[in-house]
Amino acid sequence: MNSNFNNRRDFLRRMGVFAAGVSLGPAFLAACNNAGKTPGSDSASAGTDSTGKAKTAADLFFKISLAEWSFHKALMGGKMDHLDFAMRAKKDFDISAVEYVNQFFKDKAKDKTYLAEMKKRCDDNGVRSVLIMCDNEGHLGDTDVKARLKAVENHYKWVEAAQYLGCHSIRVNAAGEGTAEEVSKAAIDGLGKLTDFAKDFNIGVIVENHGGYSSDGKWLSNVMKSVNKPGCGTLPDFGNFCINRTKPETNTPEGWAATKCLEEYDKYIGVQELMPFAKGVSAKTYDFDDAGNSVQVDYDKMLKIVKDAGYTGHIGIEYEGSKLGEEEGIKKTRDLLIKAGGVLS
């Protein structure tokens, strides 16, 4: 592993972004949890305060970002180019922070020309890169030692790409097959090894409740306590608390959407358990009522849990509904965050 690590350092030196001796210090902590507002995200508004003045994103106790998965239908359908994501976030929704999904540029992690273009698009539009959501790189909680180590090493390139793009973290999964205790032990090891690697790049490793054992808030919070490293945290998602679901007929978004949840963890208890370790938060939405409120999640209740935890970082919009188009769903989620967050700010 040492020779590979040195090669990665050389790679980053050639890209001009590696700084020797970097550690997860104040810059990293401020990036994922501070009271500062994201430049350029102030004009979108929804609702009013007690004096009748319109609330805006600048009034919130948190910052709003946009998760690329909200555009997964357009991206997978060839109706949108990944390189246009930052521009669309800013121009269409007045959102100045983005969260990438690795599968939309899965073969570009080491392509410095492509990464430079991504960075330029952000700079040109005044947009900040927050994190990369990483999937399909193996199970960090695999009970097979060799497979787990391979999964850890598969994430190295995304750590490097995240640093180059200016992100504070990569989002990973604590998945594995076996008993809860076996997968927990394996995930603690896998996450610990990846976090140690990422530390030298000033990149955090954050775990989402993303199905299986990880959607059990108590299980995942205990994993975090056992890893016990400043660079390892969570990304609580308001909607991903299905512990057990039916198998999809196809491994596609549509296939998974057609599955049924057989056992669900209490989402409010789960978020409360994960917030002490949060370095990001995902605002999941599906359907809205006539007043613009989420049908599946009580945002007033959920955002109070987030605020009570002292969190002031980014909350990423992740619209996954089917009744509205992606653009309308993103706007409704943004407006709901401003409305519900404004009451607490």
Image (cartoon, helix red, strand yellow):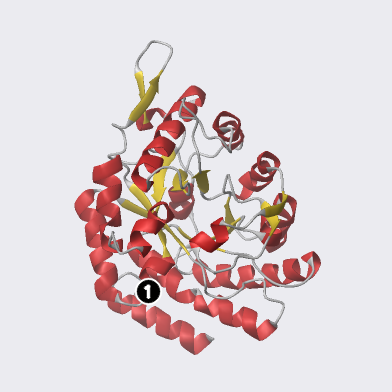
* Residue 241: image location, x then y, percent: 65, 50
Q: Residue at x 48, y 46 (%)?
A: 321
Q: Nearer the viewer, residue 321 or 303?
A: 321
* Residue 164: image location, x then y, percent: 34, 66
SS assignment at label 1: loop
Q: Residue at x 69, y 67 (%)?
A: 188
Residue farthest toward the top in the current orientation of the protein: 51
209 versus 334 height, above or below: below
Q: Residue at x 65, y 54 (%)?
A: 260
**Residue on which the image places disc 1:** 109
Q: Nearer the viewer, residue 171 or 16?
A: 171
Q: Nearer the viewer, residue 200 or 137?
A: 137
Number of numbered labels in the structure image: 1
182 versus 73 height, above or below: below
Asked if residue 100 lies left or right of residue 311, the reply is left
Q: Where is residue 152, by image quadrant?
A: bottom right
Asked if residue 204 can be seen in this view, the reply is no
Asked if residue 252 lies left or right of residue 114, the reply is right
- Type of amino acid at the residue the image marks with label 1: Ala
* Residue 202: image location, x then y, percent: 46, 63
Q: Residue at x 57, y 67 (%)?
A: 195
Mark 1 packing: few (<14 Cα in 10 Å), some, or many (20+)? some
Quadrant (top left/top right/bottom left/bottom right) for the N terminus: bottom right
Asked if residue 300 can be seen in this view, the reply is yes
Asked if residue 40 lies left or right of residue 306, the reply is left
* Residue 213: image location, x then y, percent: 71, 60
Q: Where is residue 39, by image quadrant?
A: top left
